[in-house]
Amino acid sequence: MLHAQGLQRNEVDRFTKQKVVSTIPVAIRGPQLGLQFSAEGKELFLQLNGTIAEAAAIGLADKTILLLADDSTVTLPAAGVQSAQYVSGGKGYQFKFTYHLNAGAVETLSTQTVVALRQYNTQGHLDYEVPAHTAAQVKRAAASFYQALVKEGVVPKLFFIDLAAARKHIGDSVSLTGKVTNALYSTDGKNRFVQLQVGSGRNSVQVQFPAGLGSADGGVQTGEIYLNKEITVQGRLQQKAGVPHMLLPHKKNFWVNTPVRLKDVAGFAGDSVVVYGEVLGVQPAPAGTQLQLGGDDEPQPLLLLHLFTHASPWPHLNPQQWTGKLLRVRGRVFIEEGKPLITVSSAAQID
């Protein structure tokens, strides 16, 4: 039954009296690298195990960074000083490194696709690409782990609700979608905020985040670019002045669903957006290919796409044949040398 749920262990430890949950290990790169989620009580961990050619250790300052398909990252700090052990017969060194994990990271990994990871150690760092079929296994393992944590009350359940139900879910973690009907800029004297009204009347939620998170130059972002656009947000609902309110410390759980015009895309730096554009040019780029997208009656490229085709799970795509084609792209917008850029790490982001 446990294996059917993707779990290796789900029981109370007879000595510590703490609930122990662990997932079935996922082999990411054969014997080179494996991954496992675990929990003891309210302490959450991610274990990486495998073999390396040279002796290495990790300290308190070391970390592992998981790169997701939308080019965002999850960073996990090491859970203490740990070292790899020599394997007799000259087969290298075996390691089992443990990292601290939090509920937000588990939730993210249960819905997003891991495309690569970087593991820091005393010798520097090691980078691993995650094949598509393995990435799907990691996502399933994270989902099984998250569901077990919710069932045990370790993390709050995420409710997918519509705006009309928001007032019934004060205090809950929710995911909701709606159209932005108003945008305000405010300050408390020290900090600057953007506040968006999603929905209208009693069927509305106020969503607030620090000003500048969506600004290409890091300056003040008034929020007007979101007016009349559909967005999806995830976070904990609170009540402020009798109105459902959600405070977002970052944009990882903020998506713009309404397609953004290419000439406006720079204003959405830091946001996950949907854009349409014509491929005007193709050129080589580190570990992949760069496409230049244009449109909106502008002769110059308005957006760059960096496709990691050299190490991707979709080598069948041939960007050289795309010149002149219209593409729809989903991803997070960055500004590089003054130009908006979206990194494409998964075939699911582009069609």
Image: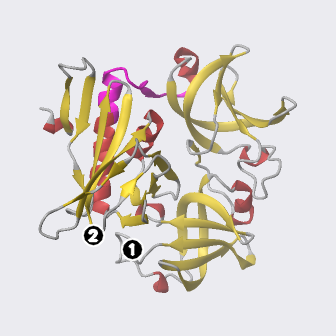
Residue at the spot 33% in from the left edge and 24% down from the top edge: 41
Identify the amino acid type marked 1.
Ala
Left or right: 236, with 198 as reference point: left
Q: Position of residue 207 (x, y in %)?
A: 67, 32
Residue in front for this viewpoint, 292 or 113: 113
Left or right: 16, with 167 as reference point: left
- Coloring scheme of the render? secondary structure
Left or right: 138, with 275 as reference point: left
Could you give the CA–CA distance between mark 1 and mark 2, rounded to whole angstroms?
Answer: 22 Å
Q: State whether residue 336 is above or below residue 286.
A: above
Classify residue 346 by image quadrant. Answer: bottom left
Question: Which residue is labeled 2 in the image?
Answer: 53
Q: Position of residue 168 (x, y in %)?
A: 53, 15
Q: Position of residue 334 (x, y in %)?
A: 65, 62
Residue mark closest to the camera, 1 vs 2 = 2
Residue at the spot 64% in from the left edge and 37% down from the top edge: 249
**Disc 2 secondary structure class:** loop
Magenta region: which residues? 146-162
Q: State whether residue 298 is above or below residue 17.
A: below
Numbered label attached to residue 311: 1
Whether the magenta-drawn stretch holds residue 341 is answered as: no
Can you say which quadrant of the picture contains the N terminus? top left
Identify the amino acid type marked 2.
Ala
